[in-house]
Amino acid sequence: MQYKTIIRITGLLMGLFSITMLPSALVAILYKDGGGTAFIQAFFVSIFLGFLLWYPNRHQKGDLRTREGFLIVVLFWTVLGSIGALPFIFSNEPNLSWTDSFFESFSALTTTGATVIVGLDDLPKSVLFYRHLLQWMGGMGIIVLAVAILPLLGIGGMQLYKAEVPGPVKDTKVTPRIAETAKALWYIYFMLTTLCALAFYFAGMDLFDAICHSFSTIAIGGFSTHDASLGYFDSPLINVICAVFLLIAAVNFSLHFAAFSWRGINFKIYFKDAEFKVLIAVQLVLTAICFITLYQSGIYDSAEQTLDYAFFQVVSISTTAGFGTESFHSWPLFLPILLIFSSFIGGCAGSTGGGMKVIRLILLVLQGSRELKRLVHPKAMYSIRIGGNALPDRIIDAVWGFFSAYALVFVVCMVILMAMEMDAITAFSATAASINNLGPGLGDVASSYANVTDGAKWVLIVAMLFGRLEVFTLLVLFTPTFWKN
């Protein structure tokens, strides 16, 4: 294990990440909110710590292997999530404890969107901007991680990209092409954010709200500048814009890359992709169920209003954004639990969405179907196909392994929370909201996590990391094999 090279890279990451403190300091100056000092302090502390790690190891530039790749990916999220907590620690408003500061930072960077802060409308603009910027940076980190890095590490079926997805993801080792891929993804990500911000602005948001909400929409994070979330604006147009961009962000970014290549725009690529079609089908079915149930319950005044709330809330929860226009936990019958379960599906692989990803659901269903056929015809040979191509059993095994590990981590986290005297509904939904990177839950965490105990918050931080790192990436570090030469 090339520890010195890993330390050098970690120091560089910390130094680069410290730059994210400066825009918030500028916002503090612009709005004269008095919050700039905390960001300047955090900038100097983080760049100093990064220098301490980088300078003694600046000449260590060995070739990295798969094991180092796992460790660097985990350090990327854990170290930067910790550094990201510094402005919250130094800030007087909000006055957060160390645990709450780490919780807010990790929730933002992993795009979970769970918050311990109450009174967002009265916070300094700089703090609000920083929370959204963290989500936006985390969202892009997810894209590069999922599309450029995880396929090379063979994580839980993510190597399916290399074989099946058109475009930039064909590498078998880390090469300069990864940098080219990252640049292309950054360009797409930035353009979508710009378009989303403009759409919000012309729909009625002020410029600050439009920029902040575009950050959290494209990152599928769910943070808002208001306690009432998007319900603050009371605008069906804003709801539709948000839902549309959430769906776009929930699509595999490799498809965006292929559809908008230098050869021209080709929308047919989307409709040839099995994962995209299933994503849209899931949204339509869930929207229909919620609309019919809500309409029959007579909660809202008209069919149009019912459809507005149903469509927005379905897309928001199932893509794991967690925005709200209405307290969905107060909806009748089974709808709150249905939406929480929909977050387990999440977005497409290679998107900023959380959850287990649509492609894995497809493969699990196809594998289950194959096993049923084998019961009837034990000697028959059945293959699982995506897009007309047969998949190797190695990928199917990885998906089953991922599902098992996901379920195990979920159960362990939920049981620990219940052992901390959290009620069953709250423990279940908080774990689901954290591991699926959703944010809002049910019970005591329906609106915020402010009343959750410190111990439970650390458990949820770990669950966020497991969900964001596709479980295996973090879990493999706990195996003795990983540390053996």
Image (tube, rainbow, N blue to C red):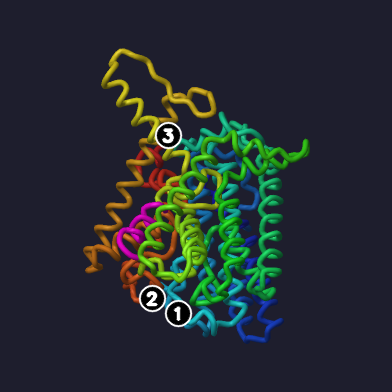
**Among the two numbered marks 2 and 3 on one chain, the one whose residue lies closer to the N terminus:** 3
| Residue with the most extreme top position | 379
Q: Residues within 10 Å of mark 3 (few under 14, many from 20)?
A: many
Q: Residues within 10 Å of mark 2 (few under 14, many from 20)?
A: some
Please, what secondary structure does the residue beneath circle 2 have? loop
Residue at the (65%, 70%) spot, across then down:
210
Circle 2/circle 3 CB separation < 8 Å: no
Circle 1/circle 3 CB separation < 8 Å: no
Whole-percent x and y of residue 86? 53, 72
| Residue that mark 2 sits on | 450
Give 469 or 425, whichever is nearer the viewer.
425
Whole-percent x and y of residue 455? 31, 68
**Among the two numbered marks 1 and 2 on one chain, the one whose residue lies closer to the N terminus:** 1
Q: Quadrant of residue 461?
A: bottom left
Q: Viewer-nearest of labels 2 and 3?
A: 3
Circle 1/circle 2 CB separation < 8 Å: yes
Residue 62 is inside the magenta segment: no
* Separation of marks 1 and 3 at Cα, in angstroms: 41 Å
Tell me: residue 332, above or below residue 472. below
Whole-percent x and y of residue 50? 59, 62
What's drawn in magenta, residue-wise? 332-343
Residue at the (56%, 42%) spot, across then down:
149
Give 148 or 441, whichever is nearer the viewer.
441
Residue type indicated by callout 1 = Val
Q: Where's the C terminus, which quadrant? A: top left
Residue type indicated by callout 2 = Ala
Give 18 or 412, whichever is nearer the viewer.
412
Residue type indicated by callout 3 = Leu
Q: Magenta part mainly helix, strand or loop?
A: helix
> Which disc, if any, is residue 363?
3
